[in-house]
Amino acid sequence: MIAVKLRPLVGDFAENKDKAREIRLHTLLPALKDNQEITLDFEGVESATQSFIHALISDLIRTFGARALDHLYFKNCNETIQKLINIVVEYMLESE
Amino acid sequence: MPILGNMRLHLPNSAFLGNLDPFLRNLVLSEPEKMEITANKRWLSLHPVVLCIIAALGLRTTKIHCERLEAKSKHYLERMGVFRMLHISSGINIQEHEPAGRFVPLSQIKNSPQLNSFMNEIVPLLHLAPSEAEPIKYVIGELVRNVFEHAASESGALVCAQYYKKSNSIKIGIADVGIGIRKTINQSHFAATDLDAIRLALTPGVTGTTSREGGTEYNAGAGLFFIKSLAKLHRNFFLVYSGSAMYKLLKESPGKHPILYSDPFKDRHSAANDYPVWKGTVIGIDLSLDTSLEFSSFLGLAGKALVKAIKERKKEKYRPKVKFI
């Protein structure tokens, strides 16, 4: 299991899509390819944009389908972050 | 007397999103070599988007002439940093004891670190509670990122915001002098006019980076739709001006329950395609603070509308076509 603490990487308002892409490409994607489980820890992240969450996880769902969700755990998400994750997941599942 | 051939703008006594149309129509944008600014002599009450427009035009020239302002409220322009951005002296002295109000002065944001520090300044400058700050940061974050990713503008984004006590609202302006929405959209879609391009840009799931449903790994095509939806659910104005087109979401009637449409032309709006050509994009939005709608509830509604739009488009795309031969 890999744990990624997002607050030190993206701050309390997660809007930097370049950071999101960096985390996805360098940490999440290799871990999923290795069939590892990942915890994305949002502790201290107060809010985010839909674009940030999209840049963070949409391609994982596009590449691995629902299997990505079997391996991803979202920890310490407040209501806003939960809503945004659900929006992106549903959007990607419907788009495919 | 205005000099023929220069860029010209006249600041009226009042220009907010509801009555911005004459101000935009009177802009003279054809010759970027010089800029001439005139203003109402008695009073100036201007939406932050107007200040962003002034500053953005100032990026196109160093030859700027601003007539001596006489309006009583002229210090507002100095406070908001208009003359600092234009690199000209206003001759207006600000007294230290004058109330500063709640505002974010004009800022030019060119990259992520600048956006990050700007975001950190917003909350204390606007004296916002955390719940009030969330939608404001969301809107500014998404709009400035749009400029970085789609505008191809070396000068970045010009942003400012102001709190209005009477309406208990924050008014936000953002402008760039980039390639404009039509060029961006036409990279992957076809928009015959600037207004067609704005319509597509506001449609959920449409992004200039791909024609594929669901967007790319980097762009969902939902950013502007969410921001328009936020304005609509707050029963506020939202305006996009790019190229020769202007689209304005009008306020929803108080008794009517707002519905989030995927087609912005189904919303109560005004739009036209014969404005002076703005090379870039300008966006203005008003956000009420005294709303009973929690931000997370808004996201739930906007998310549902987004997914519904995708489902409908897919259904339409894959609907079997009857072939008559």
Image (cartoon, coloured by chain):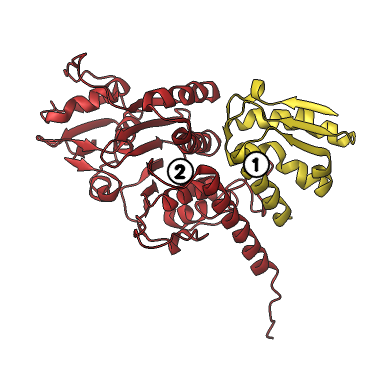
Chain colours: A yellow, B red
Mark 2 highlights which residue? B180
Chain letter belonging to callout 2: B
- Residue A6, quarter of the rendered image: top right
Question: Where is residue B212 shown, x and y percent of the image?
Answer: 67, 53
Q: In this view, does B23 lie to the left or right of B215?
A: left
Name the kind of residue labelled 1 in the image: Gln
Question: What's the CA distance linking mark 2 and mark 1?
Answer: 33 Å
Q: Looking at this rendering, what residue extends furthest in the bottom direction?
A: B325
Residue type, numbered disc 2: Gly
Q: Which residue is drawn at 87% across and 36% down?
A: A33
Residue at point 53%, 55% (across, down): B203
> Nearer the observer, disc 2 or disc 1?
1
Q: Which of B200 and B125 is in front in this view?
A: B125
> Would residue B14 appear left or right of A8 to someone viewing this image?
left
- Residue B273's disc number: none
Residue A10 on image: x %, y % = 62, 25
Q: Residues within 10 Å of mark 2 (few under 14, many from 20)?
A: many
Q: Which of B201 and B2 is in front in this view?
A: B201
| Neighbour tally class for label 1: few under 14, some 14-19, many 20 plus, Cα within 10 Å | some
Q: Is residue A34 above or below residue B182?
A: above
Q: Which chain carries label 1?
A: A
Residue occupied by mark 1: A82
Instruction: Identify the residue at horizontal 61%, vertical 28% (top origin).
Output: A45
Position above or below: B76 against B168? above
Does the rendering let one see residue B173?
yes
Q: What element carries label 1?
A: helix
